[in-house]
Amino acid sequence: MTYPDWEEIRKSHRFAGREIPMVTPDMPSFMALPIARSKEQLKGAGAAIIGAPYVANAGGMYAGVPASDWLAGPKRVRQQSARYPAGYVQDLDVDVFEHLKVMDFGDAAIPDEANYNPTAENILRAQAAVELKVNEALDVGAVPIVIGQNSPCGSYAIAKPIAERTRGKVGMISFDTHWDSNPIDRLTKDPRIAGSSNWKAKCYEFHPNFTVPNLVEIGERGMLEPRARVDDYKRRGIHFYPMWRIRTDLGIEGLCKEMRHAYEGTDAVYVHYDMDVLGGAGPAPGDILGELAEPIGMTDFEVIRCALEIGKRGFTGASFICIPPNSAVVYRTITYVIMFMLAGMVLTKLGRT
């Protein structure tokens, strides 16, 4: 699939007569919201949208797709979000931005060499850049929502600041096709790196207040993991909901109730969306994910329904990785997920849960 450039997108009638704040010349702000270019400007915001364009590639490709298409994800989500004229979610009859100040906090200053020369030191510099933005958002009381592409910049770099700032236990709700709990990062073989295949394991290795009994793991399926790894998490008390169970006895409403396990006895909850969880179920063709595509994926509705539930319960920070490249409707799906999370926050504030 090909994706149009910004000049082509903005020709749509949806942009006619509107002034769109621009983070960069070809990147509008998320939902055309005000832009905070410093921590001082972010003060008073309840949520901050942060971009983390990083891809763990070697040789210019990731999962059979050009790295440049993955890197464009945070920008393209913003491009598609800007087509919506307001924060009114008609499905829920609530205008998010009437009750919650949300700002676009720009992109983390990830060095270019981290994306094309993925040494351990370069990756750690990229991770630190995301951590800085996340910490600045948390400093002023804004919930960081990070649109990334790969780990650690779109996952561990959000989980780490939350764990470090939380006195008690930290729960996690994770949507994924893969467990991301290999013993070591496949790309660098460096034990310091919380990479695409092992970032979740590093959360529990490096941060004792991330507790497995407060991990709600959603969406893994099929023949992708060794039994010993899954059995180990079960032994440690994980709440695991594979797609087969969601589609048979549990259902999406049952799954939403099960999210309570992330909140029981915790002081913070980190929410992570690895969007390969959509798999082949839509809204775009499954093969858009290259070698990451798997059958029995979640639907767009299922992920968005869960997002609303999470927003109602509350969350400390959220992140997105592995956003299927080059599909406008998938970028719009990310926008919906974010907006329904924010809408859930507002509905709870208004007592409409």
Image (cartoon, grey):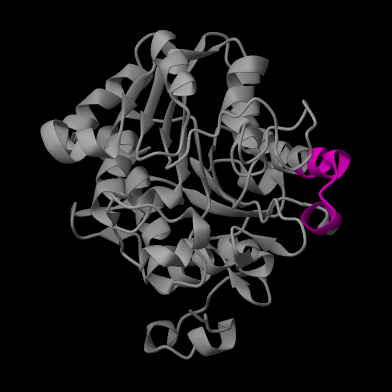
Q: Residue at x 49, y 84 (%)?
A: 9
Start-end of magenta stretch: 113-126
Say whether residue 202 is left or right of residue 352: right
In magenta segment, residue 64: no
Q: Residue at x 71, y 50 (%)?
A: 108
Q: Position of residue 35 (x, y in %)?
A: 61, 59
Residue 237 shows in this picture: no
Q: Residue at x 43, y 41 (%)?
A: 176
User: Which is the main secondary structure of the residues drawn in magenta?
Assistant: helix
* Count of residue discs: 0
Say whether residue 153 is left or right of residue 331: right
Q: Is residue 103 or residue 279 the one in the foreground?
A: 279
Say whether residue 145 is left or right of residue 251: right
Q: Residue at x 79, y 43 (%)?
A: 123
Q: Position of residue 46 (x, y in %)?
A: 48, 40
- Which quadrant is the C terminus positioned in? top left
Residue 189 shows in this picture: yes
Q: Position of residue 162 (x, y in %)?
A: 59, 25
State the image quarter where residue 62 is shown: bottom right
State the image quarter where residue 300 is shown: bottom left
In magenta segment, residue 114: yes
Q: Position of residue 343 (x, y in %)?
A: 31, 46
Q: Is residue 287 or residue 224 the one in the foreground?
A: 224
